Image: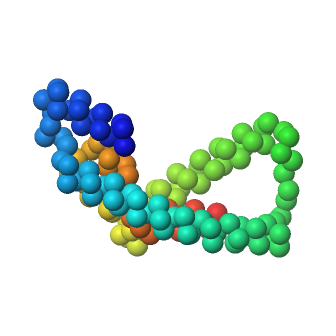
């Protein structure tokens, strides 16, 4: 919130106040807070699902004390994130859930908080 306020001050001082609207920023912050409420509940449910799948269906168990395994896991997770986000932008159903994030007239820090209550990425991410 402090960075959003700082951005507002800088835009005002530099004469770019047309790149910021208070009502748009409030909408973004409120949408972000609502999405966090839903995310909290969804993550709590997902944790139990992950535990159950891990205990019953795991194929391999990787050792946690080898650095290159952490690197491979990091790259794999990043690639899966990319695929999921790309699917959100290209598949109609997922785009319908994600479009609120791209609905602001302004491109500023508060826009990053503008997330849907039911996020398409959460649906895809929980599959993996």
Camera-side residue: 54 or 93?
54
Q: Is 123 placed above or below 25 here?
A: below
Q: Is residue 90 visible?
A: no
Residue at point 26% right, 50% down?
25
Quadrant placement of the C terminus:
bottom right
Where residue 118 appears, as percent x and y from the top left, is 44, 69
Q: Is residue 83 visible?
A: yes
Q: Is 77 placed above or below 99 here?
A: above
Camera-side residue: 55 or 71?
55
Quadrant placement of the N terminus:
top left
Camera-side residue: 95 or 11?
11
What is the basis of the colouring in this image?
A: rainbow
Where residue 27 appears, as percent x and y from the top left, is 27, 58
Label count reads: 0
Where residue 105 appears, as percent x and y from the top left, is 20, 51
Residue at point 32% right, 49% down?
111
Residue at point 24% right, 29% down?
10
> Taking 96 as reference, is 44 left or right?
right
Residue at point 83% right, 64% down?
59
Where residue 89 appears, as percent x and y from the top left, is 40, 60
Outermost residue, top side: 14
Q: Quadrant of residue 74?
A: top right
């Amino acid at each position: 919130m402090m960075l959003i306020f700082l951005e507002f001050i800088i835009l005002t001082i530099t004469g770019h106040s047309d790149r910021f609207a208070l009502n748009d920023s409030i909408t973004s912050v409120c949408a972000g807070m609502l999405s966090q409420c839903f995310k909290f509940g969804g993550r709590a449910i997902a944790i139990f699902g992950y535990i159950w799948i891990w205990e019953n269906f795991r194929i391999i168990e990787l050792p946690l004390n080898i650095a290159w395994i952490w690197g491979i896991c990091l790259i794999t997770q990043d690639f899966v994130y990319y695929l999921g986000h790309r699917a959100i932008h290209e598949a109609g159903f997922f785009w319908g859930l994600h479009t609120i994030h791209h609905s602001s007239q302004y491109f500023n820090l508060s826009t990053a908080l503008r997330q849907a209550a039911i996020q398409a990425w959460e649906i895809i991410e929980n599959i993996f």
